[in-house]
């Protein structure tokens, strides 16, 4: 198994680490069983993601996909964020080893879970957004 | 480079390579041929067999060369089951190497019954558990001498005392132990014992199975009459010679190396315990732990990411994490010790060999401490812990 240079670069120097004090939405996905937990913080103003950050427990790919996902969503409208798939995250990292593809799925889910939290708090409906999966009951 | 993964494999020692070279060059003859140059190869193979036998207190004709630990383990189980008149029940443990565990799983599909004995929190099997699971049809007990992940050394003599009373053959996988702790097959009371050369400074692709005289076992391979009709195939003469050199050398150095490497182990255990909070030693302490084995779980962080950080700074170690296994399941050994997913996923193994010194511990700590800190800052679990959530 080999990581791309881009994955290693994001792993060693992750962007947007930490929490946003006054986050508009926070999403946590994953569980310790599968070895990955991602928490994404989004700051949303006027329908635009003005800031994003994360905390992740997980392997190299989990850290790199969190880092890249938060980079990709910054400055985008909510509708645009909804279009960012796990594949977009993977592509931006020049790919992931097949066994690590689930990490990019987790990154997409973490972003959407944060959007869900934002929508719940503000009584909004975001088109195409589903409630986050409860990972605790999987496996 | 800081190599702390000697339980995975060891570097080939210079003296070993030198002893092997003639058998890769001018002494290329088939040892089964009758002419004079070939007889030299036969003699070298017999010398090596004699050396290995004397190190483990066996007779030379009880040593059978194989392609390594995995073949030895496969042979011990399949060969014994096929030859057994008792029945088709195997007793083993939950913490065996895959070389045993997956063979047992395969045998279950072939209609065998397998009992997997549990271990306690430090990895030990209880002799009374073994006694309680023996049945009239039990045809083999296989329990490793020392565990590859956490270094726990099983009380083999106490366990084999039970099987010997019942007349059941006992096999032990001594792949991690050989060359690192004294091995005496008589004192261990076992009928079979697996060895692998590359774990003690020898070459890869060569190992041996000790089979005590009169132990019923069928051959895995049919073909030529090599290894007294027990293991067909032209001998790996260079490998066999290298294995003999490596084991003799390790045995000669053991009185110095065992206390020296044990001291390295204990220093690292102390350093990590003192300097890295929320780190938990896996396995046991003292003389029932392999001299070179250190295994820690670092809470709130995942093993593969820590391993990558070490790797980026030239340090080689290994992890029990699910992410690195390819199976997305954490180490079966750590789970059997009762660790739980978070701790099993956060486990790292450092294993020392003859080339390591106390300077390596200093270097490791300089890399390890900041890497753990960096990953904890990233960790939502650490965040929750600090804030008192859960």
Image (cartoon, coloured by chain):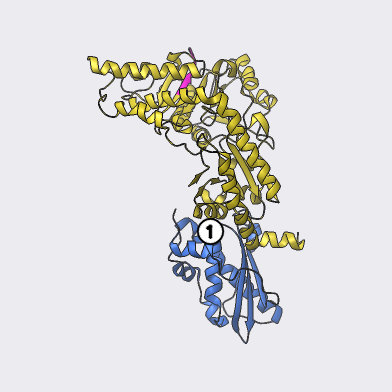
Residue B221 lies in magenta, yes or no? no
The number of callouts visible is 1
- Residue numbers of the magenta segment: B209-215
Q: Quadrant of residue B357?
A: top right
> Where in the figure is residue B257, as x and y percent of width and height?
55, 29
Of B142 and A127, the residue lying toward us: B142
What is the display colour for chain B? yellow
Q: Is residue B275 above or below residue B118?
A: below
For this rendering, which residue is in front, A83 or B263? B263
Q: Horizontal and vertical percent for residue A131? A: 63, 71
Q: Residue B380, image x and y in percent?
A: 66, 62
Image quadrant holding the C terminus of chain A, namely bottom right
Q: Is residue B216 visible?
A: no
Determine which residue is flagged by label 1: A60
Q: Residue furthest right?
A: B388
**Figure chain in blue:** A
């Amino acid at each position: 198994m080999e990581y791309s240079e881009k994955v290693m670069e994001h792993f060693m120097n992750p962007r947007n680490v930490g929490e946003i004090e006054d986050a508009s939405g926070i999403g946590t996905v994953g569980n310790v069983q599968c070895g990955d937990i991602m928490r994404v913080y989004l700051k949303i103003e006027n329908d635009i993601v003005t800031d994003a950050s994360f905390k992740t427990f997980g392997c190299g790919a989990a850290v790199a996909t969190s880092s890249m996902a938060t980079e990709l969503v910054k400055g985008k409208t909510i509708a645009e964020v909804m279009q960012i798939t796990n594949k977009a995250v993977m592509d931006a990292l020049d790919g992931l080893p097949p066994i690590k593809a689930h990490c990019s799925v987790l990154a997409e889910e973490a972003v959407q879970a944060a959007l869900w939290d934002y929508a719940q708090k503000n009584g909004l409906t975001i088109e195409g957004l589903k409630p986050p999966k409860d990972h605790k009951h999987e496996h | 480079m800081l190599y702390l993964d000697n339980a995975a494999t060891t570097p080939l020692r210079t003296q070993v390579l030198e002893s092997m070279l003639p058998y890769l060059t001018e002494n290329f003859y088939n040892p089964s041929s009758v002419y004079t140059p070939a007889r030299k190869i036969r003699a070298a193979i017999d010398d090596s067999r004699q050396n290995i036998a004397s190190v483990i207190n066996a007779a030379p004709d009880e040593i059978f060369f194989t392609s390594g630990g995995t073949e030895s383990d496969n042979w011990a189980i399949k060969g014994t089951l096929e030859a057994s008149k008792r029945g088709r029940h195997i007793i083993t443990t939950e913490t065996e190497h895959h070389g045993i565990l997956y063979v047992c799983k395969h045998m279950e599909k072939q209609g065998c019954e397998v009992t997997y004995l549990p271990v306690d929190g430090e990895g030990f099997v209880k002799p009374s558990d073994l006694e309680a699971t023996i049945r009239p049809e039990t045809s083999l007990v296989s329990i490793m001498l020392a565990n590859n992940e956490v270094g726990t050394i099983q009380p083999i003599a106490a366990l084999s005392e039970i099987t010997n009373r019942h007349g059941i053959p006992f096999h032990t996988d001594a792949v991690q132990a050989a060359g690192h702790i004294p091995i005496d097959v008589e004192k261990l009371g076992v009928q079979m014992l697996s060895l692998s050369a590359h774990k003690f400074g020898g070459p890869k692709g060569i190992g041996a199975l000790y089979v005590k005289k009169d132990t019923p076992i069928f051959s895995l391979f049919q073909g030529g009459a090599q290894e007294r009709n027990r293991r067909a195939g032209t001998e790996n003469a260079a490998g066999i010679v290298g294995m003999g050199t490596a084991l003799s050398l390790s045995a000669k150095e053991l009185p110095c190396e065992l206390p020296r490497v044990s001291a390295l182990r204990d220093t690292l255990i102390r350093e990590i315990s003192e300097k890295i909070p929320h780190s938990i030693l896996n396995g046991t302490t003292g003389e029932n732990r392999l001299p070179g084995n250190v295994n820690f779980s670092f809470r709130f962080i995942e093993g593969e990411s820590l391993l990558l950080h070490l790797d980026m700074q030239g340090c080689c170690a290994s992890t029990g994490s699910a992410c690195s296994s390819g199976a997305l399941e954490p180490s079966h050994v750590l789970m059997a010790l009762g660790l739980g997913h978070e701790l099993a996923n956060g486990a790292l193994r450092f294993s020392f060999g003859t080339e390591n010194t106390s300077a390596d511990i200093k270097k490791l700590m300089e890399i390890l401490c900041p890497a753990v800190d960096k990953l904890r800052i990233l960790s939502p679990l650490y965040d929750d812990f600090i804030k008192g959530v859960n």
